[in-house]
């Protein structure tokens, strides 16, 4: 009777132009709208404060952004070089917390706390632009060597991973904490 549950409504809009040797380029765009709710986000979640676990309210899921856009493209440059890019943009994920709202229980179930879901005051929660350049060198007997350079998070944007509860104000990102993804990284393979 742990009453853990999720509810998700999701809409995906996408368009794709596959790569062909004749055209020499490809592109893919995907936009996702998600409205995700969950009950008992973490194991426990003060569920013993309720007469029954299923009294715990549904709140916004902290695992999915409401809006997410992914754009991918590549094209053939001169001298057999292929150039590609991938961009990911997400709105911030909400923070759900038990916040104090006074001395009287608001609903008679959870003492002096209420589960509140809020978004931080930012338009973009995550942004990453990855670039790649590759070239194949063909040798005898149908063998080849491919050289590839990747630049991950080319803009070096700091995508903070931890939200702090700012109740009664909105949550805010912990700017001295962990990052989502990687800082600007160059890989040669």
Image (cartoon, rainbow, N blue to C red):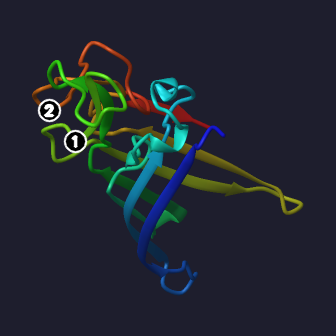
Q: Is residue 84 left or right of residue 167?
A: right
Q: Quadrant of residue 44?
A: top right
Mark number, residue 119: 1
Q: Residue furthest bottom?
A: 22
Residue positioned most to the right: 141
| Residue 77 visible in the shown view | no
Up/down of 24 relative to 2, above or below:
below
- In terms of image quadrants, where is residue 53? top right
Q: Mark 1 or 2 closer to N-term?
A: 1
Q: CA distance from mark 1 to mark 2?
A: 7 Å
Which residue is rendered at x = 57% and y = 82% of the image?
Answer: 20
For image coordinates 37% across by 25% down, the residue present is 179
In the image, 101 versus 25, the foreground residue is: 101
Give SS at disc 2. loop
Front-most of residues 70 and 93: 93
**Residue at 36 percent of width and 38 percent of height:** 153
Question: Can residue 76 be seen at all in this image of the molecule?
Answer: yes
Q: Decide: marks 1, 2 in contact (CB < 8 A)? A: yes
Give the quadrant of the C terminus: top right
**Quarter that holds the N terminus:** top right
What residue do we see at 24% from left, 25% from top? 99
> How far from the left and from the top, in percent, is residue 142?
85, 63
- Label ID, residue 170: 2
Q: Position of residue 168 (x, y in %)?
A: 11, 26
Q: Position of residue 24 (x, y in %)?
A: 49, 78
Of 145 and 174, nearer the camera is 174
Residue 61 x/y as whole percent? 41, 46
Question: Considering only vertical position in the picture, is 166 above or below 85?
Answer: above
């Amino acid at each position: 009777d742990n009453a853990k549950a999720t509810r998700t409504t999701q809409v995906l809009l996408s368009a794709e132009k596959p790569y062909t040797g004749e055209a020499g380029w490809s592109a893919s765009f995907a936009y996702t709208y998600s409205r995700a709710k969950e009950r008992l986000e973490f194991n426990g979640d003060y569920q013993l404060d309720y007469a029954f676990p299923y009294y715990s309210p549904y709140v916004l899921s902290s695992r999915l952004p409401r809006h997410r856009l992914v754009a991918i493209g590549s094209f053939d440059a001169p001298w057999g070089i292929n150039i590609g890019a991938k961009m990911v943009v997400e709105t911030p994920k909400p923070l759900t917390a038990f916040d104090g709202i006074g001395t009287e229980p608001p609903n008679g179930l959870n003492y002096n706390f209420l589960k509140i879901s809020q978004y931080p005051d930012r338009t973009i929660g995550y942004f990453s632009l990855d670039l790649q350049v590759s070239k194949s060198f063909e040798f005898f007997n149908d063998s080849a060597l491919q050289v590839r350079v990747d630049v991950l998070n080319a803009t070096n944007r700091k995508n903070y991973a931890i939200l702090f509860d700012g109740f009664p104000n909105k949550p805010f990102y912990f700017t001295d904490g962990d990052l989502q993804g990687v800082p600007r990284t160059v890989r040669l393979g």
